[in-house]
Image (cartoon, rainbow, N blue to C red):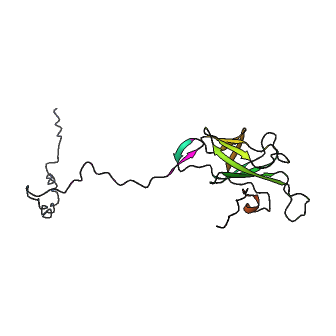
Amino acid sequence: MWMMLWLGCDPATPPAPAATPPPVAPLPAVTPAPVPPASATPAPVPPASATPAQPPETPKVNTLLGEADGITFLGNWTSPECGGRKYPRNIRFEEDNTWAGIDLITPCPVGTTCVWSGMVGYTGLWVMGDKKVLLQEMGSAGGPGSPHPTEFTADREGHLIEHGCLYTRGLHMPPGYTEEQVTPRAPKPPVVAP
């Protein structure tokens, strides 16, 4: 006995119609940009010798690391206790080649009366020499707070170094003191009237 097996669709059910895609919307009309005629003159090109505008140049200054842009050692520097010096020291370099220092040995506490201020000030002249600042102190170099600095060098991180002691920008201020009280100042020569 033969059995027939039919594969496919049921002949009683008609096949589904193929899906039709929705209609495509027409593209908007594009007007092409006008093309200049071949004889049009091109935009002027600056001559090759013209130099572009340069930013203002930072003045070069002679520093402890040689000539550099805008770097200087002038101003205030401070060092905490270091080596045999058991107290902070503030140093200031002026543009007129004067310098001054204050050793904050035992500052008198604010609001009390002391026989001695506990701070020693000194001053002198500085000159540049072989990437060093050489110091000459005016007056006696003895007394409390000795020895005073005689030369400074610099490192590439922007610190000053004096006999192995590191100085950073700024001032050391004991509690209750003001910046003015601990800023070293070199005496200015008297102004002589003409």
Identify which residue is drawn at 50% across, 52% down. 59
Q: Is residue 50 above or below residue 113?
A: above
Identify which residue is drawn at 72% across, 38% down. 164
Q: Residue furthest front?
A: 194
Image quadrant assignment for residue 35? bottom left
Identify which residue is drawn at 76% across, 61% down. 181
Residue 105, how many percent across, how many down?
Answer: 83, 51
Identify which residue is drawn at 56% across, 49% down. 71
Residue 20, how many percent across, how many down?
Answer: 15, 56
- Side of 7 relative to 171 (left or right): left
Magenta residues span: 42-65
Residue 121, how many percent across, how many down?
Answer: 79, 53
Predominant secondary structure, magenta span? loop
Q: Residue furthest right?
A: 115
Quarter holding the C terminus is: bottom right
Is 60 inside the magenta-drawn segment?
A: yes
